[in-house]
Image: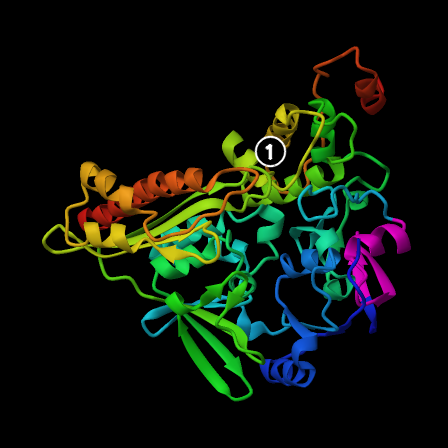
């Protein structure tokens, strides 16, 4: 299988990429790592007339500290994220998630920006940006935009990205002291996409209670969601196993799941509750470890 | 549709090619350059039979445009054996441990193992299984593939000077096997 014909462009800098995107409009697609877009093009599900490869723009690659945030360039690969000492130190959940995306070969090519822009409902990162309170930086010929993670995914395969905009950077604010994070995923046995993935960040308060608990869930019917009811039930409490177990019954509240060949919506909701319980306990254990270190 | 002049360095040799924008790297390797050791299994980025090394990263060449690889160093399965046809230590380990049956997935398995050993020289079984998730074998049940990777890893660790290890001629574990005799001349 091979894609329908198209013109290929490889700009050296972001200004050229934006100019190309502006002049070709809806006929153009941005090529990041290509591991979502090229399979879709081979199946002729997408037939862009112009492909703008941003793989040659070095400024979009890499993990760095900028002010009080970890800035991850949109063209940073999953492998670079899973193997980054900075990511492992600040956000173990993000390193865990990057290391279980698809397989080793895909992780060498696929990028965080490409994944977030494609916005698959079973992708891993959407749960992470919610739990880690990330901000997504986009740029167009008319200037830049910073989008809160809660507003990024707008619907099935749809993001807040406007025509003419490119996602360039994902910024994760530095976690307070005594903060732990974790990601637990039930992978689809064949595709390795998330049947359910739950990302959690929590801070151990001075009083020993949970603060700023955020729970991101992916594998839902359209977009990743926060498990807000479970968060509220546990905020300000000591996260004992019993308390988390009790609150986990709220993990799927307000979240819609689909039936598919693998599982019923009810099965997924059940997996959401058990996975949320384990992910919260894992993040809490990390926060406590940091406190005792 | 645009066409592009690209330069690839494949198994140490320079190739100048003209490709359509939509030409996939695996098609260029197989159909234009005759390097048919790289296989197309699923063609949907899942099976890993098309795995090659691109600038020292194991990648699925069915999902990369040839033009994206312009200027890159590529190693395919044809580049693994020595000049006189002696097997690479990883290939030898697959042979000794019967890590293949029909052999269709094997080029991809070998190329993934090459990266696995570079990144995780002390990998335990769980890590080996995790790192080979992108390579599907429909024959072996994976048991002997894991053993082959472990053997290749031990081989690499025991070569003190860090160069590509010469293959130690172990006593063949299955001495009556014709396959063994072919490779050991015994």
* Coordinates of residue B106 in the picture (x, y in percent): 74, 35
Q: Is residue A277 magenta?
A: no
Q: Which residue is mark 1?
A: B153
* Coordinates of residue A51 in the picture (x, y in percent): 70, 71
Write down the quadrant of residue B184 in the picture: top right
Callout 1 secondary element: helix
Position of B112 with respect to B82 (left or right) is: left
Q: Which residues are magenta?
A: B7-34
Chain where mark 1 sits: B
Residue at left offset 72%, top offset 26%:
B139
Position of A251 with respect to B140 (left or right) is: left
- Above-or-below relation of B129 to A83: above
Can I make out residue A178 in this image? yes
Q: Is residue B28 magenta?
A: yes
Q: Nearer the viewer, residue A23 or B143?
A: A23
Question: Most extreme residue toward the left, as rendered?
Answer: A207
Write down the quadrant of residue A170 in the picture: bottom left
Position of B14 with respect to A74 (left or right) is: right
Residue at left offset 36%, top offset 41%:
A275
Figure label count: 1
If the image is split into quadrants, where does the N terminus of chain B sit?
Answer: bottom right
If the image is split into quadrants, where does the C terminus of chain B sit?
Answer: top right
Can I make out residue B163 in this image? no
Label 1 crowd bin: few (<14), some (14–19), many (20+), radius 10 Å: many
- Above-or-below relation of B178 to A231: above
């Amino acid at each position: 299988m091979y894609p329908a014909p198209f013109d290929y462009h490889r700009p050296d800098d972001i200004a050229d990429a934006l100019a190309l995107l502006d002049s070709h409009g809806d006929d153009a697609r941005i090529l990041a790592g290509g591991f979502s877009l090229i399979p879709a093009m081979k199946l002729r599900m997408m037939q862009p007339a112009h492909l703008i490869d941003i793989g040659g723009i070095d400024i979009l690659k890499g993990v760095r500290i900028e002010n009080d945030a970890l800035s991850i360039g949109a063209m940073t690969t999953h492998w670079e994220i899973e193997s980054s000492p900075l990511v492992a130190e600040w956000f173990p959940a993000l390193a865990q998630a990057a290391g279980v995306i698809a397989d080793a070969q895909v992780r060498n090519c696929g990028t965080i920006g490409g994944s977030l822009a494609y916005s698959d409902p079973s992708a891993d990162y959407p749960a992470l940006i919610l739990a880690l309170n990330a901000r997504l930086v986009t740029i167009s010929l008319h200037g830049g935009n910073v989008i809160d993670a809660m507003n990024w995914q707008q619907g099935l395969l749809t993001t807040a990205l406007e025509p003419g905009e490119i996602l360039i950077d994902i910024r994760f604010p530095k976690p307070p002291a005594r903060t732990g994070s974790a990601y637990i995923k039930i992978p689809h046995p064949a595709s390795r996409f998330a049947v359910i993935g739950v990302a959690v960040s929590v801070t151990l308060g001075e009083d020993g209670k949970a603060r700023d608990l955020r729970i991101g869930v992916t594998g839902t019917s359209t977009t990743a969601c926060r498990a807000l009811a479970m968060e509220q039930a546990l905020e300000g409490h000591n996260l004992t196993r019993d308390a988390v177990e009790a609150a986990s019954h709220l993990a799927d509240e307000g979240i819609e799941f689909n039936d598919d060949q693998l599982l019923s919506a009810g099965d997924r909701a059940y997996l959401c509750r058990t996975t949320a319980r384990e992910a919260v306990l894992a993040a809490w254990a990390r926060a406590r470890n940091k406190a005792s270190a | 549709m645009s066409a592009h002049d690209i330069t690839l360095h494949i198994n140490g040799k320079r190739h100048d090619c003209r490709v359509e924008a939509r030409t996939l790297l695996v098609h260029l390797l197989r159909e234009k350059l005759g390097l048919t050791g790289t296989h197309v299994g699923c063609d949907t980025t899942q099976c890993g039979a098309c795995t090659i090394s691109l600038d020292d990263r194991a990648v699925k060449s069915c999902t990369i445009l040839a033009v994206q690889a312009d200027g890159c160093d590529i190693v395919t399965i044809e580049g693994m054996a020595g000049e006189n046809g002696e097997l690479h230590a990883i290939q030898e380990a697959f042979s000794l441990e019967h890590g293949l049956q029909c052999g269709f997935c094997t080029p991809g398995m070998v190329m993934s193992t090459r990266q696995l050993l570079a990144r995780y020289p002390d990998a335990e079984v769980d890590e080996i299984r995790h790192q080979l998730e992108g390579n599907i074998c429909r024959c072996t049940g994976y048991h002997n593939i894991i053993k082959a990777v472990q053997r290749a890893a031990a081989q690499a660790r025991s070569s003190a000077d860090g160069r590509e290890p010469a293959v130690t001629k172990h006593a063949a574990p299955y001495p009556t096997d014709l396959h063994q005799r072919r490779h050991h001349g015994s």
